[in-house]
Image (cartoon, helix red, strand yellow):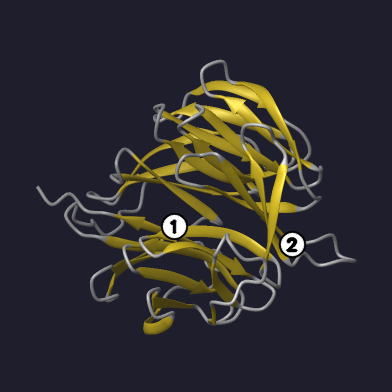
């Protein structure tokens, strides 16, 4: 029997923290960062995706072959999708009514319908992790953690039609406004830690430039103030200036930040070790607020409410 979780109003603007150490979701009111509720899901959770215009949340963990989806407005589990162990990421595709799921054990991208039916499974290469949708070229770019390449999947044919050569252990992808440039982060290979964001042309696949952002820039977000990266190795958030190599604007935040999201002139950053969320004014690059979340916040999501 399904255990009922607290219902959450469709009108509320939410920050959602995916808490990996305890298998829970923390819902905060975006306006004041006050906690609305915690959902203890009684399962392992490492990531999530919002579906159906933010009405549904689907959760996953690499050790669990099942993806569970829940309706926010009722707190009820809707259905369980049959996948496979090894899930690394999940992305709701805006241009298609599909969800892309990457699997690092099967080395696949599986395209699901929003109701959890498999549309197509595609072998892509060794350990796909980061994904980003390119609406201009109608593609899904996927980084392969254990290979020196990013692949582009055509979203009509659902076949690979592009390969870009990148460093090993690349992780974190961002596209500029017209999708002409792909920004790529990464950890490094154990012997040499990565200190740069690299920018590639999505048209030619050629390397354009590197932005120096020590240490280990692993993910990106944007807002009205620009593009930012989390330098995981130094607990820093960099505001990127693509016109200079050495990046000067940064802020140290928390301990072990994995995930951040942007909204207007604000960023929200999660500290995995401190179980905290930080609100940052990205115009001044100063922390303005903090809030407690569940243990091990590994991913953040922003859900804009329906204000009609």
Q: Position of residue 281 (x, y in %)?
A: 37, 77
In the image, residue 56 sits, relative to residue 283, either above or below, namely above
Q: Position of residue 268 (x, y in %)?
A: 41, 70
Closest to the camera, between mark 2 and mark 1, is 2
Quarter assignment of residue 191: bottom right
For label 2, the crowd category at 10 Å Cα-Cα, with few meaning under 14, some 14 to 19 and many 20 or more, is: many
Helix, strand or loop at mark 2: loop
Q: Position of residue 50 (x, y in %)?
A: 38, 46
Circle 2 sits on which residue? 187
Circle 1 sits on which residue? 41
Residue 203 shows which numbered tag? none
**Residue shown at 54% from the left, 29% from the top:** 139
Q: Is residue 252 left or right of residue 84?
A: left
For label 1, the crowd category at 10 Å Cα-Cα, with few meaning under 14, some 14 to 19 and many 20 or more, is: some
In the image, residue 138 sits, relative to residue 71, either above or below, namely above
Q: Is residue 181 visible?
A: yes
In the image, residue 304 sits, relative to residue 154, either above or below, namely below
**Residue shown at 62% from the left, 75% from the top:** 256
- Residue extending furthest right? 191
Q: Quadrant of the N terminus?
A: top left
**Residue nearer the viewer, 143 or 52:** 143
**Residue shown at 24% from the left, 76% from the top:** 32
Inter-mark Cα distance, 2 to 1? 30 Å
**Residue nearer the viewer, 126 or 215:** 215
Helix, strand or loop at mark 1: loop
N-term mark: 2 or 1: 1
Q: Is residue 272 visible?
A: no
């Amino acid at each position: 029997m399904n255990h009922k979780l607290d219902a959450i109003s469709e009108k509320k603007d939410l920050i959602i923290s995916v808490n990996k150490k305890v298998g829970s979701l923390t819902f905060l009111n975006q306006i004041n960062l006050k906690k609305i509720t915690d959902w203890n899901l009684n399962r392992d959770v490492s990531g999530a995706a919002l579906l159906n215009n933010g009405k549904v949340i689907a959760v996953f963990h690499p050790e669990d072959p099942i993806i569970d989806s829940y309706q926010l407005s009722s707190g009820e589990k809707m259905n369980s999708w049959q996948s496979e162990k090894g899930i690394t990421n999940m992305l709701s595709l805006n241009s298609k009514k599909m969800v892309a799921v990457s699997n690092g054990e099967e080395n696949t991208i599986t395209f699901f319908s929003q109701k959890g039916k498999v549309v197509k499974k595609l072998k892509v290469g060794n350990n796909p992790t980061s994904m980003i949708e390119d609406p201009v070229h109608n593609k899904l770019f996927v980084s392969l953690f254990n290979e020196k390449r990013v692949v582009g999947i055509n979203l009509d044919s659902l076949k690979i039609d592009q390969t870009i050569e990148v460093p090993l252990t690349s992780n974190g992808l961002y596209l500029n406004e017209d999708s002409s440039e792909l920004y790529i982060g990464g950890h490094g290979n154990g012997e040499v830690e990565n200190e740069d964001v690299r920018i590639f042309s999505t048209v030619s696949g050629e390397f354009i430039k590197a932005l120096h952002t020590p240490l280990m820039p692993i993910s990106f977000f944007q807002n009205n103030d620009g593009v930012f990266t989390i330098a995981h190795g130094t607990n820093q958030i960099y505001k990127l200036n693509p016109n200079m190599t050495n990046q000067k604007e940064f802020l140290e935040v928390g301990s072990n930040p994995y995930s951040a999201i942007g909204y207007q002139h604000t960023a929200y950053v999660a500290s995995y070790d401190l179980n905290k969320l930080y609100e940052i004014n990205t115009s001044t690059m100063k922390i303005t607020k903090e809030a407690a979340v569940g243990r091990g916040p590994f991913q953040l999501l922003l859900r804009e409410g329906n204000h009609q």
